[in-house]
Image (tube, grey):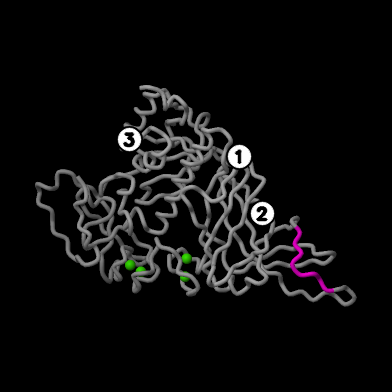
């Protein structure tokens, strides 16, 4: 049984040796000291460059560490407990609060039901955290860079769009993506631009500001667009947003169900990034949101929880899920040929949710969303050969028995 770990990680500084009788099941984990040689500010993350020690721990500590130790490093400011790798960016403070190397980056927002997801597109709603971007709000443009996961080498620049309504009081932007294929999963990010002030050569009339061609080409430094006969250079403002992963919808009932499943799972990627679930989860520690006990590996629980409102299959282990799909005639070993959005795909020890087969790389790879990867929820890109089977969402799952 779990829930044995005390919630006193912030104060307990010593570890008591377990009596031999309690050591029936121990696990080896790498842990960092709490204190000046590790996690000095007690936020759960040791300073970058700290050295871990190897400990034998009880089951309930195997995803974290015993009192007096922490499991993770990567703290870019070990003097401030509010700065660590899994939290939201604090807006407009010029500080990289989440230790990802980007300062005040724009954060796309996830919703469990998606946001404007249709059969041909979706809307990216994002929180702008960079004062430089807001300061240019009166003459600001944004562009979506779109990366279809089934063709991961493509990064398609979408039309430049004028930003309206952005202010410190309302630091949000919404950008629609249109004209896409149904049932397709995308990664995407936003990049902001401002027009560079431009002095036309003598004899040529001044440009008309704000006229934007959709035939623009993009580069890392900016875009050259045509306004009348004059080139206007657009230069990037601030940093690129974080990636947003989402899907277009389908038209059939089953494809709409797949969309619902994906959007529910992808919302949990944000929940994990913000530290609300998983390691040191501020709302639900480790995999408890998904029905796991403290110390339990929770990849199967995460899949089961994600499909729960929509698909009548659940299990706490790879073996349990496999037998449920098998029982309904919905289990296959041809992962490449069968797997579709939202399906369960597995290795010998790990459950994941299928997002897309990436045909742009050889050998082909698979995109997944998965729980309990280092005690987090993440989108992953993995070898097809890692996978040995697929539980396929199909109508037989609703059959009796
Ligand atoms: Ca720390
Ligand atoms: Ca810190
Ligand atoms: Ca910040
Ligand atoms: Ca950051």
Secondary structure predominantly adopted by residues drawn in magenta: loop
Task: Report the residue marked by disc 1.
Answer: 182
Q: Secondary structure at mark 1?
A: loop
Q: Quadrant of residue 346?
A: top left
User: How many angstroms separate mark 2 from mark 3 (CA)?
Assistant: 41 Å
Q: Earlier in the sequence, mark 3 or mark 1?
A: 1
Could you classify mark 3 by the number of other residues whose Cα lies within 10 Å: few (under 14), some (14-19), or many (20 or more)? some
Q: Secondary structure at mark 3?
A: loop
Q: Secondary structure at mark 2?
A: strand
Q: Earlier in the sequence, mark 2 or mark 3?
A: 2
Q: Which residues are magenta?
A: 206-213
Q: Which mark is residue 324?
A: none
Residue labelled 2 has its Cβ within 8 Å of some atom of ligand 4: no
Task: Report the residue marked by disc 3.
Answer: 315
Image coords of residue 292 (percent x, y): 29, 45
Q: Which mark is residue 157?
A: 2
Q: Quarter of the image containing the C terminus?
A: top left
């Amino acid at each position: 049984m779990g829930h044995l770990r005390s919630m006193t990680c912030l104060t307990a500084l010593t570890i008591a040796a377990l009596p031999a009788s309690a050591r029936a099941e121990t696990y080896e984990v790498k842990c960092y000291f709490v204190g000046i040689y590790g996690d000095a500010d007690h936020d759960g993350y040791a300073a970058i460059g700290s050295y871990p020690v190897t400990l034998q721990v009880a089951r309930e500590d195997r995803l974290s560490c015993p009192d007096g130790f922490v499991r993770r490093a990567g703290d870019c400011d070990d003097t401030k407990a509010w700065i660590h790798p899994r939290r939201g960016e604090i807006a407009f403070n010029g500080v990289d609060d989440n230790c990802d190397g980007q300062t005040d980056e724009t954060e796309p927002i996830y919703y469990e039901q998606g946001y404007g997801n249709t059969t041909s597109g979706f809307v990216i709603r994002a929180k702008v955290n960079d004062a430089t971007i807001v300061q240019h709000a009166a003459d600001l443009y944004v562009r979506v860079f779109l990366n279809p996961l089934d063709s991961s080498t493509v990064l398609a620049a979408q039309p430049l769009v004028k930003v309206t309504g952005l202010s410190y009081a309302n630091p949000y932007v919404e950008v629609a993506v249109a004209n896409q294929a149904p049932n397709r999963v995308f990664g995407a990010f936003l990049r902001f631009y401002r027009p560079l002030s431009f002095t036309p050569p003598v004899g040529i009339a001044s440009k008309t500001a704000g006229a934007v061609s959709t035939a623009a080409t993009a580069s890392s430094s900016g875009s050259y667009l045509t306004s009348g006969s004059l080139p206007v250079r657009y230069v990037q403002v601030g940093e690129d947003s974080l990636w947003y992963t989402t899907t277009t919808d389908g038209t059939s009932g089953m494809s709409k169900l797949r969309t619902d499943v994906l959007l529910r799972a992808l919302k949990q990627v944000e929940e994990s990034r913000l530290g609300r679930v998983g390691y040191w989860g501020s709302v639900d520690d480790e995999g408890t949101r998904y029905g796991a006990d403290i110390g339990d590996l929770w990849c199967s629980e995460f899949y089961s929880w994600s499909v729960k409102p929509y698909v009548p299959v659940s299990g706490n282990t790879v073996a349990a899920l496999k037998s449920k799909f098998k029982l309904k005639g919905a289990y296959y070993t041809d992962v490449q040929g069968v797997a579709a959005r939202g399906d369960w795909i597995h290795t010998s020890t790990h459950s994941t949710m299928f997002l897309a087969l990436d045909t742009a790389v050889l050998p082909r790879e698979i995109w997944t969303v998965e729980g309990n990867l280092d005690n987090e929820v993440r989108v992953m890109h993995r070898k097809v050969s890692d996978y040995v089977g697929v539980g396929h969402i199909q109508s037989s799952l609703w059959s009796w028995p």
